[in-house]
Amino acid sequence: MKHIALITGASSGIGKEFVLQIAAAYSSLDEIWVLARRLSELQKLKAELSKKQIRILPLDLSQDMDLEALEKYLKDEQPCIRLLVNSAGCGKSGPIAEQGWRDACRMLDVNCRALTAVTMICLPYLRKKSRVIQMDSGAAFLPQPGFAIYAASKSYVFSFDQALGAELKGRGITVTSVSPGPVDTEFFHRGGITISPWKKIFLAKPEKIVRKALFDAEAGKNLSIYGCSIQLVRLTAKLLPQKLLLGIMRRMLL
């Protein structure tokens, strides 16, 4: 049986960094499957890792047809997925009234629907000691005016991950939610997101986020948080009244 890692959002940013670090650290893998919409970027990644077995799957996971294609690939190959990394995601900032509903629904399609579908499609191919790593966000821990839809989508992911992890515990499979703050990638540029000055202070490098995520996943942790700022956000969300927090966030983000 072929042992693989499967990474979505692999063409750039955190997803690409996962591919690079997994390729370096997991020599026992037979193949690494890389999924993203941008074929040219996946081809560059494969060339960069020419000594590794990289399988390119240029798929748009917001489309049912492409999800069905992934399902067929797995049925045909019958691999053992040792590492599943759901890193595909998109975001857009601004007041809800100023955003288009199509952009909002695409955000939900990618961040929630596609992640759920990919996870469920891959479940039959996970085995004992398989690791599921889901890219969540520090935004999951409290509502964010000006970033409302993205934050809500990540709250869904966090809740989904925690429940799935509890369901899979008996099979010896762990699910790790990775919840960073702002990360220094092209994510903000692609989404037309303006980074507030206070967020720039806490910009983290994707290399460090991914390194900790892989370490925490191997340790069987259900949550991976890099940096004290998001630890503080999570604690604050638990302790302070939501009305007060919403007022603070509104002044900071709008």
Image (cartoon, rainbow, N blue to C red):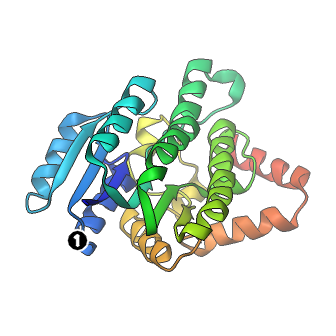
| Residue at the (53%, 41%) spot, across then down | 194
| Residue at the (80%, 53%) spot, across then down | 248
| Residue 100, visible in the rendered structure | no
Q: Is 2 situated left or right of 133 in this image? A: left
Q: Is 75 or 120 nearer to us in this picture?
A: 75
Q: Residue furthest bottom?
A: 219
Residue 165 appears in which quarter of the rendering? bottom right
Picture coordinates of residue 66, whole percent (x, y)? 37, 29
Q: Is 106 situated left or right of 28 in this image? A: right
Q: Is 68 or 86 nearer to us in this picture?
A: 68
Q: Quadrant of the C terminus?
A: top right
| Residue at the (53%, 76%) spot, across then down | 220
How many C-alpha atoms fall within 10 Å of the one at disc 1: few (<14), some, or many (≥20)? few
Q: How many labels, in total? A: 1
Picture coordinates of residue 150, whole percent (x, y)? 62, 40
Picture coordinates of residue 127, whole percent (x, y)? 43, 64
Specify the amino acid type for callout 1.
Ala
In this rendering, the answer to whether 127 lies above or below 190 is: below
Q: Is 126 or 99 nearer to us in this picture?
A: 126
Picture coordinates of residue 19, whole percent (x, y)? 29, 59
Q: Is 145 situated left or right of 22 in this image? A: right
| Residue at the (25%, 62%) spot, across then down | 20
In this rendering, the answer to whether 154 lies above or below 230 is: above
Name the element at disc 1. Answer: helix
| Residue 235, visible in the rendered structure | yes
The residue beneath circle 1 is 24
Q: Quadrant of the N terminus?
A: bottom left
